[in-house]
Amino acid sequence: MKAKTRIALLIIIGLLIIIMIVLSVTYAFMRPVLETSSITSIDIKSCATITLEDNGESINLNNTHPMSKNRALQTTPYTFTVSSACESYVGFNLYLATLNTNTLDAANIHYIITNNGSKEVLSEGILSDATNALSDFNSDEQEQLNNGINGTFNNVYKIYVGNIPYQGEASYDLYLYVDSEVTDAATMGKTFTGGVAVKAVDREKTFAEYIIEDVYTEDGANGLYYHDGVGTYTNASQEAGDNSYRYSGANPNNYVCFGSDAATCPNDNLYRIIGVFESQIKLIKYDYATDSLLGIDGAYSGSSSASDYTSYKGSQSALYWYYWDNISNSNIWNNSSLNTINLNTNFLENVGSRWSNLIAEHIWQVGGLTNTNGYNSNAQTAFNYEVGLNTANVTYIAKIGLMYVSDYYYSASSIYWNYAGFNSSSATSDYRAAINNNWLYMGGFDWTLSCILDTTDSIFFISRPGATSYRNANGLSGVRPAFYLSSEVILVGGSGTISDPYRIS
């Protein structure tokens, strides 16, 4: 008999018995409810429900043979789905419990976790190298482990830590195999049996949850407004109605240090929170971006002394000017050199992978506005036509963008939300009157993301006096990159003031 055939016949690996063990967000340990079908699920009195679904092929290592990682990824994995009805993320740990009757050492078992249908590895390793997490289970839970695997466990290994999305689900594939790189003839005739366990766990509050749950108390408190279309304050009827939480007023404590861990956050790393949109926080650079951040290629033009601009509120000695698109003088954002080169290439490279990984890809509305709906209108009208119900629905998917016109309008105190962005008849009835009560006003020239859709070359920008205006794509303005943080970004420190900005991870 050939050696390979003999090894294949002699290595006996026990069937991996599928179990489910869930600790709900209320920390009540639930017994599994076994169904007659191939699905094992938990009926719990909580918003967290975790289901392990047998995809027709259980993880069966009977009569298997040692293999490589590439070969293992061609086998049929065990698929499980974690779903949640919670109003926030639910963290969970995935464990593998091994029986005390096993004779095949965990040092021979390799595990791989991937997203369902993907070969991109989320977690992998040799089982014996994984954290032995027996201390995660109290005595009652350990008894549940024994009941689930129809025996007595020996070790409990933690092999993955994940999050269940906000009111959603996540599906994963689990591969287990005898690793040919760490297996020799001593493994012949050995057995291995184990079980999968999943526990919901406490986790750190996300940054967005902190703003919603701890900073917001009522409309206007801490400069934060909940735009649900309901309120009793001045101009509450002008809310965006998108259920966002937006900062408004002269100088709310909405500063964030992004791109630096220095004890004192450098000015160039200060950003501010525009608001919370669904479960993502939208940031904008506090001051104008420099050429060291955006580069001197693409849409770059040059710089001038900041002292030339008496209205400028920042602290830089020079201001750096960029075209919106100096190549074709077009107001189509998809083709903008500022977009493709300076923001979504140079900026991401210069902040570094650690920080750029905290930024979510976003579907930006880039269809723009007409003059009437843009700078001649109030906040709610601009919002509806720019990103709301009446949008042109022209989108662009990227990480980095710019402020919307409506972002600028809603950042002013609520008493200005019914003002026009620009009124040729009266500066006291447009946003020039709001500059001392609008934290987003910086006193230079600010590009926005929105074009004037009834032209081919004009884009809205914020003028030095504080009104909304427009200029050609080959005109010049300052740039303040804006982006949405990933929903999973957490708050690790800070109070949100300029001297003690929020710190995130």
Image (cartoon, rainbow, N blue to C red):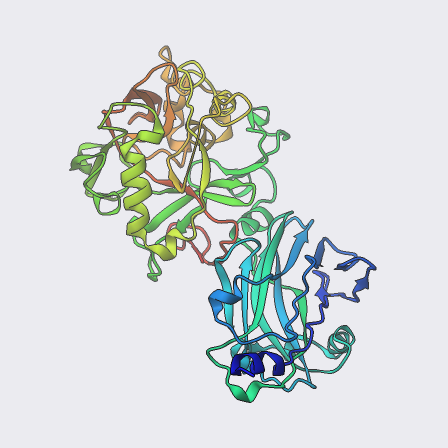
Percent across and percent down for residue 88 are 62, 51
Residue 366, by quadrant, is top left
> Does any portion of residue 132 appear in the rendered image?
yes
Question: Which quarter shows the N terminus?
Answer: bottom right
Tell me what residue is drawn at x 60 percent, y 62 percent: 77
Percent across and percent down for residue 148 are 76, 72
Vertical placement of residue 128 versus 160, above or below: below
In this view, the residue in front, 221 or 169, is 169
In this view, the residue in front, 169 or 27, is 169
Tell me what residue is drawn at x 56 percent, y 53 percent: 117
- Residue most toward the front? 1
Residue 144, by quadrant, is bottom right
Percent across and percent down for residue 237 are 59, 24
313 left or right of 26 in image: left
Tell me what residue is drawn at x 51 percent, y 82 percent: 183
Percent across and percent down for residue 351 are 32, 52
333 left or right of 227 in image: left
Vertical placement of residue 456 versus 6, above or below: above
